[in-house]
Every structure is written in C-alpha cells, then in structure tokens.
C-alpha cells in the first residue's frame, strides 16, 4: 500500500462505510487517517457499541466525533441506539453535503420521541434526497417546511395518524419513491404527488382505512390493508398489487389502466364489485394473480359468481401469465362457464398457467375447464396444478386426484403437478 498513489488509497478507503472498519483504518497511519474526511458514507450498525457505551453517553460522543471528521459526508445511516437530543447538531454539521439519511428510531430514542417534535431537525439537511426512518412515532406531522430536494421517503414500522401522513407527504412535493411499510394507521389517507413513480403502502390492522392517491406519473403501486382505494391519474401504471389479509375490500376505483403489465389481487374477502371493476380497467394486463378467497359485501362469506371463460379471456386478450387460486378457478368451472366455447375461440397469448385446486367438488367440470385451457391456449408452454392444499375430507378427493394424473400424462409436455 505504501507504493500506491494517494488518489488510489483514497479511492479504496472511500468504499468503506462501516464505522468499525473506518476507525480501524484510521489507526493504521497518518496517510490513511488523512483520507477519512473524504469518505462519502458512515454506517453505524446495530452492534456498533456495547451497552455500557450506549448507557454512559460514550456512543453519542463517538458518533459526533466521526460525523465531525468526515467533512464531505453524503450518506449517514444509524442503526445503533443514540440520543435524539444530539441529532440536530450532527445534521447541522453536515447539512451542506448530506444527501441520504437513514435512522432507526428505537431504544434510547423512543423515550425522547414521546414529547413530539423529535423529527423537526431533519429540515436542517436542506439538500436531503433520500430519507428512511425505522420505528418512528409520528402522530403529528414534523415541522419540515418544504424538502424540495427529497426524492425518496421510507417509513417502516411506525404508528401513524392519517393527518400526519397527509401533511408529511405534502412537505415533500417532489417525491418519486414513497414507502410506508408495516405502519399502523386508520382513517382517510390522502396523497397528492405529481412526480411520484413508485409507491408501497403496507398498513397493519383490521380496521377500515381508505386511500385517495393522485399521482399522474405513477408506474408501480403496492397497497396493503385498505378497505377503499381511489386512484387518480394511473394511466402510466405498469404494476398494481392490492391486498388485505384481514377484513374486506369494499371498493377499488382506478380508472382505465392501458399500460398495466402486472396485476395482483389478494385477500380473504372482496366485494365482487371491487373485483370486477379492477379486472375491467385492467383489460390489457399481461400477468394476473388472483388470490382472493371469498366475495360478499357483509360478514357472510360468499363464493365468486359464475364467470364465463370465453368472456373473461376475450376481455383480457394480452394475458400471458395467469395465477388462479381457489375461488377464481371455481368460478371458471361452473355449469355455464364453458357454454360459449366454439371452434373459433382461442386464447392468443397465454403461455404460463398456475392453478391452485382447493376442493375436489365439481370434479367433472373442473377437468373440463383444464382441458379447455390446454386446448384453446395456442401458445401455452406450461400449466402447473397445485393440489397440496386441497381439502382431503371428501370421498371424491382420491378419484379426482386420479383424473388429474391422467390429464397430466396425456399432456405431459405442458402439464405438471405440484
């Protein structure tokens, strides 16, 4: 290393971010220590300090010294416990250069967060472009003013109020990426962002929570935990995933989605009006995942209504990959589902089909549907039939499984059983 030019040494050491590595290298020699101010990032892992250092305040002193030593700091990540009272001073020291900030707000920080206003100091980093917060308490919106340069905002594992979300997002008008993951919230969430391209909203709890999202440039949306969803300006949307593990989805209003490539609908219970609305708007979808167990607008769980197979695939002519689970497959296997089949019908683009069979009931009609899907899908490459979750409490289960095996052997080039 003594023969390596100073610029190369500086470049090599600039790839370090873990503070333990930085501290060790700074002790090697003066030449290496002189490279510390040019480090672009500092990462304080969860175990950066022992319990004695954290409790005695030595950890805060060490963080402060290292932040002060790195004069061109662009990225600061702190996962270890720290005192919120010291954060404003650290951010003020590097406000001109700091672009990425990630904080894990728990342990010692939790006690100080109860008083509120603990995140106001983020506004000191006026050039911030990416902000990630873990375990933050946000019952009131922080006083950030307007973070014009912020492009990425991610909040994980936080109890939130709907008004705090609306006001916080409004303070970041130029966001392109928004993620609220594992957050506990109820009420009406309203988000209006003209530059937003990617959005992930994962809300916990079984209560009613509605989403009003206006984002004309949105390309990807993942929404979990909402009862009502209204999307405005989703014409550029390419990926849409909606899920609710508890409770019901009553209404989804997206408008037409001409560029949609991937659509995933999951949950225990959806109203059929919400399901049919999304499917009609996504007529150009190429990859469809349907994993909804029941329909019904009230507490009574109901099966899907009968779906005409010809009408469904004529309404989704570009569908290339289709994952059908339980209720949706049963709806395509009703008495009149195949009544419109004729020699002119074909499924033009379907290449991959994954079917989860949950019940052996109505076995003859299900086999007819499987045969029709193979026969009329002119580009079909693979059909996977999952029966591992099939309820085996009926005498017909063994007979049905035998018929599925026969079907598989007849179409062994395309069909396989999981």
Image (cartoon, rainbow, N blue to C red):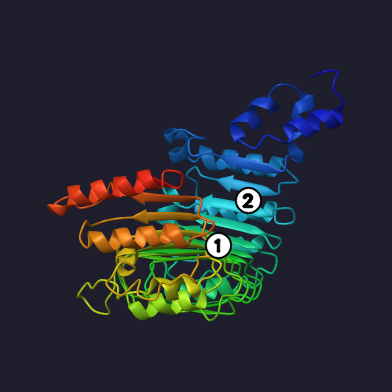
Using the rendered image of the protein, determine whether residue 283 is visible from the camera's viewpoint. yes
Which residue is more in the foreground, 95 or 173? 173
Q: Secondary structure at mark 2?
A: helix
Q: Quadrant of the N terminus?
A: top right
Q: How many residues crowd around disc 1 within 10 Å: few (fewer than 14), some, or many (20 or more)?
A: some
Pointer 1 residue: 349
Instruction: Indicate left or right for 11 with 274 as reference.
Output: right
Pointer 2 residue: 90
Q: Residue furthest front?
A: 343
Q: Secondary structure at mark 1?
A: loop
Identity of the residue drawn at 49% across and 42% down: 80
Identity of the residue drawn at 65% across and 76% down: 194
Q: Is residue 274 above or below residue 38?
A: below
Q: CA distance from mark 1 to mark 2?
A: 57 Å
Identity of the residue drawn at 46% across and 33% down: 50
Q: Quadrant of the C terminus?
A: top left
Q: Is residue 197 above or below residue 256?
A: above
Q: Is residue 308 above or below residue 289?
A: below
Q: Position of residue 356 (x, y in %)?
A: 33, 55
Viewer-side label of 1, 2: 1
Using the rendered image of the protein, determine whether residue 114 is visible from the camera's viewpoint. no
Q: Are the residues at dot 1 and dot 2 in contact (C-beta closer than 8 Å)?
A: no
Mark sitting on residue 136? none
Q: Position of residue 31 (x, y in %)?
A: 80, 26
Q: Quadrant of residue 219?
A: bottom right
Which residue is more in the foreground, 165 or 316? 316
Q: How many marks?
A: 2
């Amino acid at each position: 290393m003594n023969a390596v030019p100073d610029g190369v040494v500086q470049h090599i050491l600039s790839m370090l971010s873990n503070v333990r590595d930085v501290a060790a290298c700074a002790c090697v020699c003066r030449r290496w220590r002189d490279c510390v101010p040019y480090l672009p990032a500092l990462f304080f892992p969860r175990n950066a300090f022992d319990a004695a250092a954290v409790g005695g305040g030595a950890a805060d002193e060490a963080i402060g010294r290292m932040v002060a030593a790195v004069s061109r700091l662009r990225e600061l990540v702190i996962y270890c416990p720290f005192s919120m009272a010291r954060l404003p001073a650290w951010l003020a020291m590097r406000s001109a250069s700091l672009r990425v900030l990630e904080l894990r707000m728990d342990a010692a920080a939790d006690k100080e967060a109860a008083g509120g206003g603990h995140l106001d100091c983020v506004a000191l980093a006026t050039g911030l472009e990416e902000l990630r917060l873990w375990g933050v308490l946000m019952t009131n919106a922080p006083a950030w003013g307007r973070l014009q340069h912020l492009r990425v905002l991610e909040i994980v594992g936080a109890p939130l109020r709907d008004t705090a979300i609306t006001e916080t997002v409004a303070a970041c008008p130029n966001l392109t990426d928004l993620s609220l993951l594992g957050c506990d919230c109820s009420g009406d969430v309203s988000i209006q962002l003209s530059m937003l391209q990617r959005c992930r909203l994962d809300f916990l709890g079984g209560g009613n929570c509605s989403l009003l999202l206006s984002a004309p440039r949105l390309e990807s949306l993942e929404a979990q935990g909402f009862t009502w969803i209204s999307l405005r300006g989703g014409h550029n949307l390419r990926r849409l995933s909606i899920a609710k593990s508890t409770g019901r989805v009553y209404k989804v209003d997206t408008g037409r989605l001409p560029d949609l490539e991937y659509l995933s609908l999951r949950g225990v219970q959806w109203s059929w009006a919400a399901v049919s609305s999304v499917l009609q708007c996504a007529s150009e979808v190429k990859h469809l995942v349907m994993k909804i167990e029941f329909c019904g607008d009230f507490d009574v769980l109901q099966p899907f209504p009968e779906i005409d197979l010809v009408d469904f695939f004529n309404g989704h002519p570009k569908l290339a990959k289709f994952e059908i689970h339980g209720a949706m497959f049963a709806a395509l296997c009703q008495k009149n589902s195949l009544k419109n089949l004729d020699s002119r019908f074909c499924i033009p683009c379907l290449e991959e089909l994954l079917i989860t069979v949950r019940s052996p009931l109505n076995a003859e009609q299900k086999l007819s549907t499987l045969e029709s899907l193979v026969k009329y899908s002119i580009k079909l490459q693979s059909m996977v039939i999952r029966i591992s979750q099939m309820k085996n409490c009926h005498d017909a289960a063994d007979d049905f499984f035998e018929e599925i095996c026969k079907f598989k052997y007849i179409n062994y080039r395309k069909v396989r059983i999981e």
